[in-house]
Image (cartoon, grey):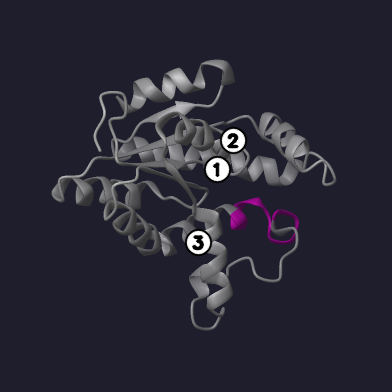
Amino acid sequence: MHTDHRPWDVLLIGGASGVGKSRAAALLAERHGAFVVEFDDVVAALQAATTPAGHPGLHHFAGHGAPEEELGADRVLDLQIATAHALDEALLGVVRNRLGVEVPAVVEGDYLSPRAAARAVAEAAGRGRRLRAVFLHEGDPERIGANYAHREPDRGPQPARAAVSARYSRWLADQAGAHRLPVVDCRPYESLPQRLAAALA
């Protein structure tokens, strides 16, 4: 059901790990009575149901406990991008399923690629449905590290992981801009809901 205050039927929230997507998704879902789909759960299910031999694009990090330290930052960034692109069709499958029901949905995750999001926006429009996509950006690895430390206190700030996440965030922001999708800075957190609403209006 369309409402004046919710200009979407399905909302995609992309962004790197540790930038605050889950918090933003939960807030918007509560505000608009929407269902939350955590795309990371879809990724985990696909990885559990496939093998590295059969679907290598989904298993780039198999066997690496701390890939940033074992593979190096440049290689990890390249593999994150490759994984996101390998999951494009899976994201579109989720979107098509959610567009088939009337309950609004927020889909959030690290591996939402801007190119898949742009395809989803166009496909939804062709079906007469309203899909919006937005990417959250945090370019400061220290801030991301602090977020990791808060949500995963037993693991500490994880500076190598945070540094790669900040680089991935910049890549996502650049790609989102190229696909004419809005990018919203995570900070200041206090005004994030209002800025997201403005970007999605």
Do the CB atoms of the residues marked 1 and 2 lie less than 8 Å apart? yes
Numbered disc 2: secondary structure: loop
The circle drawn on residue 19 is 2
Residue 99 in the image, given as x and y percentages of width and height: 28, 52
Residue type at mark 1 is: Ala
Q: How many marks?
A: 3
Crowding around mark 3 (Cα neighbors within 10 Å: few <14, some 14 to 19, many 20+) is some
Residue 107 in the image, given as x and y percentages of width and height: 43, 47
Residue displayed at 50% across by 37% down? 25
Of marks 1 and 3, which one's residue comes earlier in the chain?
Answer: 1
Between 66 and 92, the one lying in front of the other is 92
Residue at mark 1: 16
Residue 43 in the image, given as x and y percentages of width and height: 52, 62
Give the magenta part as a residue range: 68-76
**52 left or right of 134?**
right
**172 left or right of 68?**
left
Residue at mark 3: 42
Q: Based on the displayed image, in which of its 4 quarters is residue 45 positioned? A: bottom right
Residue type at mark 2 is: Val
Residue displayed at 54% across by 44% down? 168
- Report the mark closest to the observer, 2 or 3: 3
**137 left or right of 123?**
right
Residue 61 in the image, given as x and y percentages of width and height: 63, 65
Separation (CA) of disc 1 from disc 2: 6 Å
View extreme (right): residue: 154
Of marks 2 and 3, which one's residue comes earlier in the chain?
Answer: 2
Numbered disc 3: secondary structure: helix
